[in-house]
Amino acid sequence: MSSHTSALMPPAFMPSEYGPALRPHVATMPSMTSVSVRELFPSFAEPLTQGDPADLDRVRAATRAALADVDMSKIGAGDSVNILASEHGFGLMGGLPYAEMVKTLREVVVERTGCRDVRLRLAIYRGFKEAEEVRDHFGFAEAFEGKVKGLGPFDRGVEVETAIGPMWLVNRAFDADHFIHAYYDDPREMYFNRLLYKSFKSFCMSYARFETRSVYHSMFGNRSGSIIPRALFDSDFVQSKYTFSSVLRTSPAGVTEIDATDDLYAIDRRITASHLATYGRMQRLFAEIEDCVAVWDGGRWGYYLHAGGVIFGVLLTNHHDSFDLDIPVVAGFMQVPGASVNFTRNKALRGIVVNQAWVGAGIPYVTMPFTSPMYIVGDEQGKLWRDDPTNPLLMDRATVVDTVEQGIEQALERGKTDKLMVFDGSYGHITCNEPMAALLREKAPAVDRMVQTELLPKWLAQRGLA
């Protein structure tokens, strides 16, 4: 049996008023260890970075290399350009790689076109202070000479005619002569988007008014929803202002490359094939976990905290193969018409310990307090959750504990499990305890073979990528 090795530290994250005061990470506990995702799946390529600030030169160089062949002739020296950035990119590996790509985009556009009126538009959800926090934390005010503004789904809209009828975009996103789509390929809610046109999602979920955004979330299912962002992207209005896309590419191992071109459909095909091969393996490995406790230990919403590049939401809902399109509905609360509401979830998840995470701020944790015991560390965090109007019943069922050690002990005992996985924002490795590490190492080889020989060919063929 191999000797115990200490856990690797997760990437640093942005402090925020939407979360508690920063506390020590679970990775510092003596019982924690780390499992490398490239040990589990050797086919994963060596990344440019896993979020280390020392690696930002690599991100900058990769961005410049990707932009070298991009046509920027639409942009004149006297024109205005909006670089559109979306919120969850700043939660990937601490946000530094994404921020560096965005800053480098501006530098190259100014150098190549002579255009000085290059603005940053930060598309944020409903946390109205978040754009200011992002601007200040990543130094965007200086990098963009003060031309930085946030935008959200309740800002003034602009009506756009699309192939499926009129929709509403946020005016501030498109109030320049041109825009650049600065995005990231983090699959996050793979149980929703199912890797169907993921690269277009922000045209609805970041750049659209609430009315149109709600159509995507509430009136379409897991597969048909992708028609909304594509209809917006393909509209005459958007195409008249669109220049090109620059996408931060990832695998569970970390940032792999920057992909830049004016053909977003081509980028999307490349991302889909890559994600099915890499995130598909991680998703199926998580499905092999029969019992465990999860810890939230990062600076974003709990749903979206990563472990080995995969968010907690995948573990929560991982009771179906999200990528198999022969299965019509995969998320428990995306219902078949006429069926009763079904709050299903992954019964392997025996408890959730919240060491540190953002409170709801508009995100309802619909099923969790009713299906998985929750342990909230500290009175400060307990008050934040109790005061959150999005989750009024959560604290009636959650337990406040004094320390994360106490929460973990209670969760493991009540859940009758010895396995613990920490969602702390890490790419490249999974923070966990020794029983979980042993399970992942045991299950990975069979998962690797199954995905390569059985599942991946099917997933690709279903999407016309065979």
Image (cartoon, helix red, strand yellow):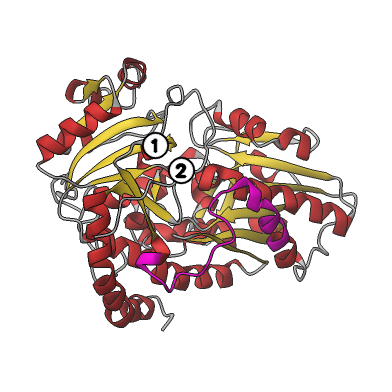
Q: Residue 56 magenta-drawn? A: yes
Q: Quadrant of the C terminus?
A: bottom left
First in sequence, mark 1 or 2: give its number: 2
The percent coordinates of residue 145 (x first, y second) are 81, 36
Q: Nearer the viewer, residue 306 or 161?
A: 306
Quickly name the residue at label 1. 28
Residue 185 position (above or below residue 411): below
Q: Is residue 354 above or below residue 268?
A: above
Q: Position of residue 464 (x, y in %)?
A: 42, 80
CB under 8 Å between callouts 1 and 2? yes
Which amino acid type corresponds to the residue marked 2 in the rendered image?
Met
Q: How many marks?
A: 2
* Residue stretch rendered in magenta on the structure: 39-62
- Front residue of 268 and 228: 268
The quarter of the rendered structure image containing the N terminus is bottom left
Which corner quadrant of the image does residue 68 belong to?
bottom right
Amino acid marked by disc 1: Thr
Instruction: Give the residue pinned by disc 2.
Output: 9
Tell me the crowding category of disc 1: few under 14, some 14 to 19, or many 20 or more residues within 10 angstroms, Cα based.
few
